[in-house]
Image: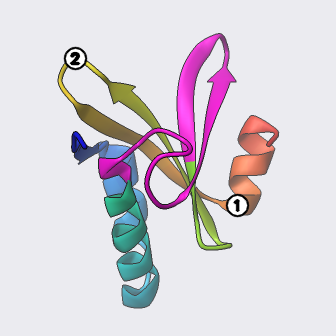
Amino acid sequence: MISYTVALSDKAVDFLSLLDDKSKSICKKNLQKLVSPYPGRGPGDKEKLVVAGEEMFRLHIGRSYTSFYIIDEKNKTVRVLEILSIESAHKKYGF
């Protein structure tokens, strides 16, 4: 199986920096699941989404957070765009 590199946007890094140590650890552990980023492959609750006509994906992190990411197939890289609380994700994206 091909493994992808996971990169965090500044926005995602900033979000993680605000979390307590336990929540930060849980998020980082779950983000490692994105080395296999496609839904139905590998661990994690992942789903493909279309937002404003653009393809992106989401990963639920426990019952508290959701990360949104894109996959750069050419470079085998996953770019985590942002991490939000479940409530904020629902408000922003409607799902």
For the N terminus, which image quadrant? top left
State the extent of the magenta-drawn residues as a range. Answer: 34-58
Residue at image coords 47%, 38%: 38
Viewer-closest of 84 and 72: 72
Q: What residue is shown with label 1? A: 86
For the C terminus, which image quadrant? top right
Amino acid under label 1?
A: Ile
Q: What residue is shown with label 2? A: 74
The image shows a total of numbered marks equal to 2
Q: Position of residue 68 (x, y in %)?
A: 52, 42
Give the Cα distance between marks 2 and 1: 30 Å
Q: Position of residue 50 (x, y in %)?
A: 66, 21
Q: Earlier in the sequence, mark 2 or mark 1?
A: 2
Q: Quadrant of residue 16?
A: bottom left
Front label number (2 vs 1) = 2
Q: Eyeballing the image, is 43 above or below 28? A: above
Amino acid under label 2?
A: Lys
Q: Quadrant of residue 21?
A: bottom left
- Circle 1 SS class: helix
Residue extending farthest top? 53
Residue at image coords 32%, 61%: 32
Residue extending farthest bottom? 22
